[in-house]
Image (cartoon, rainbow, N blue to C red):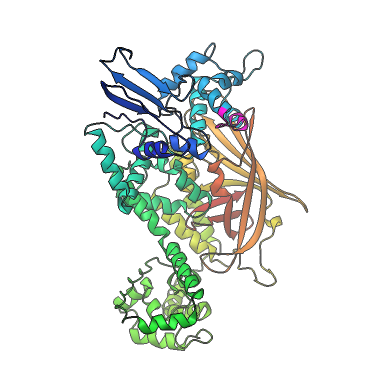
Amino acid sequence: ADIHQHRPNSKLRRAMASRSTLLCLIIAGGVRSFSVNTSKAPRSCSTYHQRGAAAPFAIQLRSSSPPWLAKDGIVLSSTASATEFPAASDVAAIEALFAKHSSDGLMTEEELRSVPAIKDMLEQGELLSTELSEIWSCAPKFPDEKSVEKIDVESFVQVYRDIDDLFEDDDDVVEEKAEADPIERIQNDIELAETDEGGRMYELRQIYAQLTDDNSKETISFRDIMQWEDISTLIDDDELGEDELVSLWEKATGVKGMDVTMNFGMFVKFNDALDDLFEFDDEETSDDGVEDEDEGNDPAQGEEDAAESVEPEASVPPAPLPVITDEDLPPGVLFSMIANESYLVGRDEIKRWGELNDMLNEEDITQAEVDALFDSAPKAPGAVDLLDEEGFESFFDSIDNLFEDEDDGDEEAEPAIDEKELKEELLELLEDLAKLAEDEGQQLCGLDCSELEQERVLEVVGELEREPYNQVVVPDGVTGEGAITKDQLTGEWEFIYSSSSTMKYNEGLSGLAGGLTKFGGLRQTLSSTKFLSDVEYTEQLETKLLGADTEVKITGDWDLRTEVSLFTGKLSNVMSVTPDRVIYGPRSDKADHWKSLGPMNLLLLTYLDEDLRIMRGSTSTDTLFIWRRI
């Protein structure tokens, strides 16, 4: 039989095998072929079964000999009428649907609800009226003389796609070409899907087809990856950092930066690397399950099994852990990176300290000196040859003191350094970057900086954070003494630099810049009383043509608290922001669904003086946000 498909094979099989659909074909003699068409976009058959509705099949019989069949065939359908459901990727079909049901090139909400495709979903309960109202409220409007809100064809296309995005299944998959025998192809797909690796590759191909269908290209961009629901969920849940995502992208594509596109082979590498990030958690879960089973067994039975068991096979030694090659790490951060599963450091863990290995190779220090310093460092309670964090910091300082005399001699030979020289160096560096961006027409606030420029800023900031005039210190874990107060942060601040990849991607904070507007700067106003703490961002959008500039205001609440850092294990000052509204022009929208605001919502305060504030990302500490008090 010649089977023509409009959905992936697996979804077609699931729909045909579902208990909620009973499909009977009575075929008379002379029928050459039939086609099963599950083309009621924007849903797949499996989505209908998940939400409790029957899949609308259309079965077409094509024949040439029986006289009772029409020349072009007949259509047997489970739906009462042939409702037009264009695919979300078919812009031309959606525009044609708009032209058929709109008047004067615009459409009201009532007319939108009467579009057969949408009306049918509302009547069947597949689309809730509140969901459609929410989508309508977010679409750009064009009020007429009677102040009735209407949408144009571009807004209608977006509304149609937003409705399609409500459903979990990725339905808009490119139709497979029937180059080989269709029956043989389906059988091969079933056999492939029955294997673990085959099923995984089949799933990846479906996802890749969805992403390429959405952008109407054969490859996918970094923007497509950012909009992939799995990735956006990981970022929103703080399980995947922005820098980690960029690193995975660059490793998969083999090219620095985010301008290159990704083919399917690269996409597989990207998913393999993404899975490896969470492999450790999976192993811990598996180990816990084994322990639970052992606890539930009879001890006597366990002894009998042990007596009867044969000699165990030799265990495979674990792969060596990587050497930490980062330079100038604080001792607390280095300890957390090389410590074993008991959060202690022994002689084997010391070998993972890359800088110490370099000093040994360059003969700046001998192994005997390292061993002597390790032996003299205080050991962890109850341990013979292991260091806790305090002991490791003592060991770290003793190595650093070996080179202190040489450093002191150099400092005596040099003139006295102004205590604020590092701060002035940072401000001059940022001013040079801002001037260069203005001369070359680049984004403000470092959003177009190169990697070398970002590394230089990060280096100066790291040195500045260690200066004695930095008001940010490690708070006392018991009394809380040393924690920054809200009164120290209240006031108006000007945004002068960020290395956030999300802000680069969105060309600012709100994500509204682009097209005829560009990011023109950002201010933050913090206020605090005994009961309320309010925050207001004011983002300037400059028009590229003649006309007035636009302001975007983002309001919300903010809080300042102390939390234990995942990287240092010490208390840190954390600033959290909960956005409430995004106001631009006559519109005022809820801010809870504005993903572009995410980078500012949870930050670590690492430097503060009378007129300069430096924040770092909570999950990516190399991401900087620098503010200057106005």
Q: Is residue 196 above or below residue 213?
A: below
Q: Residue furthest left?
A: 180
Q: What secondary structure characterizes most of the magenta part?
A: helix
Residue 406 in the image, given as x and y percentages of width and height: 41, 78
Q: Quadrant of residue 481 in the image?
A: bottom right
Q: Is residue 7 above or below residue 112?
A: below
Please identify the quadrant where the N terminus is shown. Answer: top left
Viewer-proximal residue among 533 and 630: 533
Can residue 507 be seen here?
no
Can residue 623 be seen here?
yes
Q: Is residue 252 left or right of residue 134?
A: left
Q: Quadrant of residue 95 in the image?
A: top left
Q: Is residue 473 left or right of residue 91?
A: right
Residue 444 in the image, given as x and y percentages of width and height: 49, 41
Residue ID at (57%, 31%): 125
Viewer-proximal residue among 110 and 557: 110
Viewer-proximal residue among 180 and 132: 180
Residue ID at (50%, 79%): 388
Viewer-proximal residue among 61 and 581: 61
Residue ID at (41%, 27%): 39
Residue ID at (33%, 17%): 73
Q: Is residue 431 above or below residue 589?
A: below
Task: Give the tally of numbered discs.
Answer: 0
The range drawn in magenta is 124-133
Residue 248 in the image, given as x and y percentages of width and height: 37, 52
Q: Is residue 239 magenta?
A: no
Q: Residue furthest right?
A: 530
Residue 414 in the image, given as x and y percentages of width and height: 45, 70
Q: Is residue 26 above or below residue 487?
A: above
